[in-house]
């Protein structure tokens, strides 16, 4: 009987570990650019605005304590609506991620939230770390918002927009 209990525990633990490995991992993009913090910060704010996102939920700039120090910033957008209504939402979700499994679910909204960290480093470079989280409202079965990871398209599009804006600002200023 004792061996049967041990075998069952091993089976359960093995199954739980396999399930955890099957879950999609969030896409995290990191870029290091030869640009000052201010240039990067203004570029990311402009890119977020261009994508039609409302005012940010969090916008925080940590100024250096000493002169000549390095800046850090955190930008968390509000939810940017990608699709609304029964007809278009499911197709939008399928374009940017896997549709969450809710049998018989009817999705009526799809949205994304961008989380961007910016850190100025020595040598005149700035590091950008970008994540996105998808969410939507399912109204028929759960009548609740659900959150999931994207397939990376939105993150790559946003990072490309930020990078192009940085290059444009640098070209305009002659740096």
Image: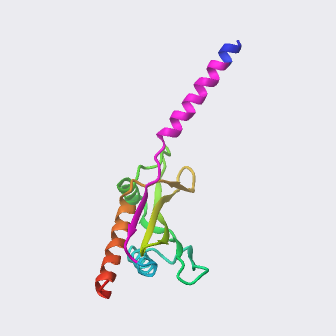
- 118 or 145, which lies in front? 118
Q: Is residue 165 above or below residue 80?
A: below
Query: Is residue 16 rendered magenta in the image?
Result: yes
Residue that sits furthest to the right in the current view: 2
Residue 47 position in % (x across, y down): 39, 75
- 162 or 118, which lies in front? 118
Q: Is residue 41 above or below residue 131?
A: below
Residue at figure coordinates x 64%, y 24% from the top left: 9
**Which quadrant would the N terminus be assigned to in this image?**
top right
Q: In this rendering, would 160 be left or right of 36?
A: left
Q: Can residue 134 be spotted in the picture?
A: yes
- 117 or 88, which lies in front? 117
**Which quadrant would the C terminus be assigned to in this image?**
bottom left
Q: In this rendering, would 59 be left or right of 30?
A: right
Residue 44 position in % (x across, y down): 42, 75
Query: Coloured how?
Result: rainbow
Q: Is residue 21 above or below residue 88?
A: above
Q: Is residue 7 above or below residue 35?
A: above
Residue 15 position in % (x across, y down): 55, 30
Residue that sits furthest to the bottom in the current view: 173
Residue 139 position in % (x across, y down): 53, 56
Query: Is residue 63 rendered magenta in the image?
Result: no
Q: Can residue 111 be spotted in the picture?
A: no
The answer to which quarter of the image holds residue 91 is bottom left
Please report the bounds of the magenta region as a residue range: 6-35
Q: How many marks?
A: 0
The answer to which quarter of the image holds residue 90 is bottom left
């Amino acid at each position: 009987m004792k061996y049967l209990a041990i075998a069952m525990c091993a089976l359960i633990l093995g199954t739980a570990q396999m399930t955890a490995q099957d879950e999609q991992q969030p896409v995290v993009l990191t870029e290091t650019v030869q640009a000052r913090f201010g240039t990067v910060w203004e570029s990311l704010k402009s890119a977020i605005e261009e994508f039609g996102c409302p005012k940010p939920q969090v916008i925080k700039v940590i100024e250096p304590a000493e002169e000549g120090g390095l800046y850090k910033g955190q930008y968390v957008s509000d939810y940017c609506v990608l699709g609304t209504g029964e007809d278009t939402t499911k197709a939008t979700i399928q374009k940017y991620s896997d549709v969450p499994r809710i049998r018989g679910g009817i999705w009526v909204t799809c949205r994304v939230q961008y989380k961007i960290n910016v850190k100025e480093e020595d040598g005149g470079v700035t590091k950008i770390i970008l994540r996105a989280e998808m969410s939507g409202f399912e109204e028929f079965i759960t009548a609740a918002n659900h959150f999931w990871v994207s397939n990376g398209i939105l993150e790559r599009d946003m990072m490309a927009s930020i990078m192009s804006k940085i290059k444009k600002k640098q070209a305009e200023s002659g740096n």
